[in-house]
Amino acid sequence: MENLYAERIKNVPRSFIREILKISLDPSVISFAGGLPNADYFPVRHIQAATEKVFTDYGSEVLQYSNSEGDLQLREWIAARYKEQKNLIVSPDNIIITNGSQQGIDLLGKVLLNDGDGVLIEEPGYLGAIQSLSLFRPVFIPAPLNDDGLDIEILAEKSGNCTAKMLYSVPTFQNPSGVTYSDENKEQVSAIAEKNSFVIVEDDPYWELRFSGKPSRSFAHFLPQQTAMLGSFSKIVAPGFRLGWIAAPEALSEKLLIAKQAADLHTSSLSQKIMYEYLVGGDLDTHIKAITDAYGGQCRAMQDAIQNSFPKSIQFTRPEGGMFLWGKLPEGMDSMALFDEAVKEKVVFVLGILSIQNRGQQTRFG
Amino acid sequence: MENLYAERIKNVPRSFIREILKISLDPSVISFAGGLPNADYFPVRHIQAATEKVFTDYGSEVLQYSNSEGDLQLREWIAARYKEQKNLIVSPDNIIITNGSQQGIDLLGKVLLNDGDGVLIEEPGYLGAIQSLSLFRPVFIPAPLNDDGLDIEILAEKSGNCTAKMLYSVPTFQNPSGVTYSDENKEQVSAIAEKNSFVIVEDDPYWELRFSGKPSRSFAHFLPQQTAMLGSFSKIVAPGFRLGWIAAPEALSEKLLIAKQAADLHTSSLSQKIMYEYLVGGDLDTHIKAITDAYGGQCRAMQDAIQNSFPKSIQFTRPEGGMFLWGKLPEGMDSMALFDEAVKEKVVFVLGILSIQNRGQQTRFG
């Protein structure tokens, strides 16, 4: 059997996040790893009401095969939300409903990446994206994150010296750092993307979860013709639906649609309709306000605890929203050793060392 | 943008099935194309009851992130069904829940196929599988279907002359021919697969929809260590859930799980739990009996109509179950010309010419 596997899968390890999640299942473990929304806040009652409405109003229709783009009403809702929240004009025709934004990452890899193509990625970067894109055997090119976004000099230099096909970014309350790109940084990154011809993947599931500061713009404001936006209902409603979307320029959308159809024909029509009915049912904005307040409170509590209990030599980000906060150990200190100590005390967190160079080596040179 | 696309997507056309489906949306068109279950038979009331039970019994739990393998209760149900229906011992640990069996095909392509690897496929073959596997840029190697399964001589010769990684087969009430492999044919195919070291993909969504004849065995009875079984709830319950599964040997399962996680983390936990509660709710067997009777009646009506109205020079298969029936035109007659004439009369069907050589050329040499 061993000799039958494709090259792309041979050296991809099981996800470390997955292994951490396994440890976290022990209720006595305190987990700071992974972006698990707090299930206590899920709007179960409203979702249940939306579900009842779906069965009453649509009946067997939502149980039949459907189109690969996804539910038109849901795509129209997403387009209207882009206009309302971000002042972006997006056509529902260029939106594809996906199984969470994770599937959007996979489809982008399928459509853009040949073996050995360059993928620019934040350092530290989102492990789920690295894992997903690894299967297309790219060369990962890490660009460091500063407090206001990507290091522009390093990004310009590195992307000028390679043929990168895409930059994968989580520009708002980034996973795992909590960093938000400034609009100025986005404009500069967009100029580099235009010059060096790569697609900017803007994975933005946390944008609506802002508890301080002012809203940031999208890469699509600066470079719409080269920006693919990934969105998700996982963080603003609930992840169990596995519902997200890609909004991309028309020509790219067309290719993504072929990949989506090949991947699984379409996303569950029942789930899509339940989500749509929930979204128009009137609870969403109240719900987002409630969870944002709660996450803001949790973040402040954590920052206070860090302030009071951690050595001053450890630096932390100060996120204005979302679910992540990142610490930097003093030069030379071993995060893996700290992790092992933490596990003994039944505490887990995500390590920067798991991020890109390491993973890149495993998949390309391992 | 054009120069940024991956090789795998450049020459893959939009699915023809998809285009046919578009024509079929016109209610005045009579469609014999595509395996669309009859929505009138969907067990809506029972599914609604199952959904209510899920919200009552599980609450927010089914809206949270879950494991990539899929719901354990659902996997245990599937394992028990294999034992009960096919007398096969399958461990729930080696079952992965997928977004329809289409995703199973995609994951198998990801895990097994390098550019240019051989894929043995039935002729005529299931277009959805051909489309999905095309993205991994294999060389398709068609093997003709006879009334009792694959042409053994041709399969032995062709698979001996290449390094095929897999055979994709729909051995029961095949899509699109309606042919069922005999147990003897399966045993012979298994021997060839063992000798020439390729995985048998047994895509078997129609097995429970038998309206005459006696149940056939699985490839897993003859060659369990090289058989990957794809299953689906689309035809026995409803396709809108997008719920299927892969049951594969342990080592292959492990690789498929990594691919599944990279593709979309996991399948909707809400959908899975609703399906599980429907399955254990007591309606399933009654429901399958009812739809099988209905499809059997429709098949007989169609065969009678063919008998009475078609020229004798057109040969038809005589399926014992499922949803497909296949006609062979006399040598030299152009099916595309017939299709164009049929569309004028508002009738559509699937063409054999769309099948493999043609598609293989488009993706490999186009």
Image: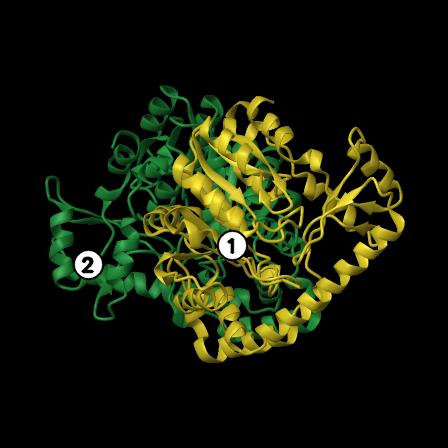
Chain colours: A yellow, B green
The percent position of residue A298, horizontal first and vertical second, equals 77, 61
Name the residue that disc number 2 marks: B306
**2 vs 1, front mark:** 1
In this view, A134 is above or below A77: above
Under circle 2, the secondary element is: helix
Q: Nearer the viewer, residue B231 or A84?
A: A84
Chain for numbered disc 1 = A
Residue at label 1?
Answer: A99
Residue type at mark 1: give it: Asn
Q: Can you name the residue that lies furthest to the top here?
A: B161
Is disc 2 in the same subunit as disc 1?
no
x and y percentages locating residue B345 in the rendered image: 13, 63
> In the rendered view of the protein, which quadrant contains the N terminus of chain B?
top left
C-alpha separation, residue under disc 2 versus residue under disc 1 = 42 Å
Left or right of A313 in this view: B226: left
Q: Chain of mark 2?
A: B
Q: Which residue is at a point 61% across and 27% down the rendered structure image?
A: A362
Q: Secondary structure at mark 1?
A: loop
Identify which residue, B122 or A146, lies in the foreground: A146
- Give the image quarter of residue A40: bottom right
Horizontal and vertical percent position of residue B56: 68, 74
Task: Specify whether B349 is left or right of A355.
Answer: left
| Amino acid at circle 2 | Ile
Q: Position of residue A288 (x, y in %)?
A: 62, 69
Q: Residues within 10 Å of mark 2 (few under 14, many from 20)?
A: some
